[in-house]
Amino acid sequence: MLGKLFVISAPSGAGKTSLVKGLISSAVHNLCLSISHTTRPPRLGEQDGVDYHFVSEPTFQQMVHKGDFLEHAQVFSHNYGTAYKNIHDQLAQGKDVLLEIDWQGARQVRSKFPDTIGIFILPPSKEKLNERLHGRGQDSEAVINQRMESAYSELSHYKEFDYLIVNDQFDLALEEFKSVVISQRLQSAAQEEQLKMLLIDLLR
Amino acid sequence: MLGKLFVISAPSGAGKTSLVKGLISSAVHNLCLSISHTTRPPRLGEQDGVDYHFVSEPTFQQMVHKGDFLEHAQVFSHNYGTAYKNIHDQLAQGKDVLLEIDWQGARQVRSKFPDTIGIFILPPSKEKLNERLHGRGQDSEAVINQRMESAYSELSHYKEFDYLIVNDQFDLALEEFKSVVISQRLQSAAQEEQLKMLLIDLLR
């Protein structure tokens, strides 16, 4: 594969999605977002094919059956999955791919793409995390409790990731996130491929 | 060691020193430059204790004899060396240290600090490199020829380094250089140490 695959995980409320969107809209060339399939209904403002591929339960199960998914998981009674083909095609085109996913998905992805780079986003404090989990103001207490439990379970898996980024000041966290992506491209093995012609020129 | 040691090598004329100075004067906290000892006379504008520790040949040999140097080498009939104690003290204080050095020095450093991160700076083309090697306008033809031979010998060792950065557009190269330094700090092992209190707080 020419491109690199980055999986980004975080407890709900750590600001992962904003960071991923920030990085995608910054000037990093050849970087794209993997768009997951889900059976969850769209939230206000979410668009099909942009935020997710929104599919019905039968369609999703058919894709599972056909082995279309690199990973899939059920979260809060909805199904989420990553289509293998999308990722594969983007990497083969030399694009770096960002994949937002939970720790279970990250494990499945890692088993199929061992060179996957794992990035885990941490909230700046327990207090801030709890505030953010409560703060959306559009969910019931039961959903919030379920989300908190899931957040703390997610947090307990931070060690399975290669990089840890604290999302305290957004701009700083975004710069750090960008550093991780950029620095992977500068590694000698990747550069030898990228700079083949230059190296031939320089070394006669 | 709490800090990380970065060795930066490049053929003469690749712009290594400007990049190192650029990074040191950017807002990266806890980053410092290792200042080498040399028996070479100061160039116009160079300051003792800032650009180098300028020492006499006998003083240098005494330091070699006492085993003060992490590495030392002769380049163009002058001696250059890196005092072990300086680097050690800075790393122990949790500072990241940048060390400008040639491939031979880099090898010696790596053998003593195996976690050293090697960065190699490449010129954007052979033409540009040759221009730059000629361009200083203060050296004789013999010195230029010697420098070119040395530059091509240096280039042939690029594979011994972890990261390759092309210095074509200075600002871009500086940003890439910064990415490499910042991303090392974000690695899980380093962050677990840095974020000990936060992780305890978050995980109860």
Image (spheres, coloured by chain):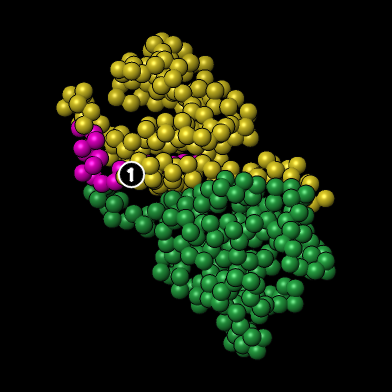
Chain colours: A yellow, B green
Figure check: B58 above or below B171: below
Q: Which residue is mark 1?
A: A169
> Seen in the image, is B130 located left or right of residue B53?
right
For the point 80% across and 69% down, the residue is: B140
Q: Amino acid at mark 1?
A: Gln
For image coordinates 69% across by 68% down, the residue present is: B104
Q: Secondary structure at mark 1?
A: loop
- Residue A71: x and y in percent read 46, 27
Crowding at mark 1 (Cα within 10 Å: few <14, some 14-19, many 20+): few
Q: Which residues are magenta?
A: A117-134
Q: Is residue A184 magenta?
A: no
Q: Return the chain for callout 1.
A: A
Residue occupying image coordinates x 37% and y 54%: B192
Q: Residue at x 56, y 77 (%)?
A: B48
* Residue A132 within the segment the image draws in magenta: yes
Q: Is residue A188 left or right of residue A32?
A: right
Q: Residue furthest left?
A: A141
The percent coordinates of residue B77 (x first, y second) are 75, 77
Q: How many marks?
A: 1
Residue nearest the observer in this picture, B7 or A83: B7
Say which of B200 and A62 sits in front. B200
Asked if residue A109 shows in the view, the reply is: no
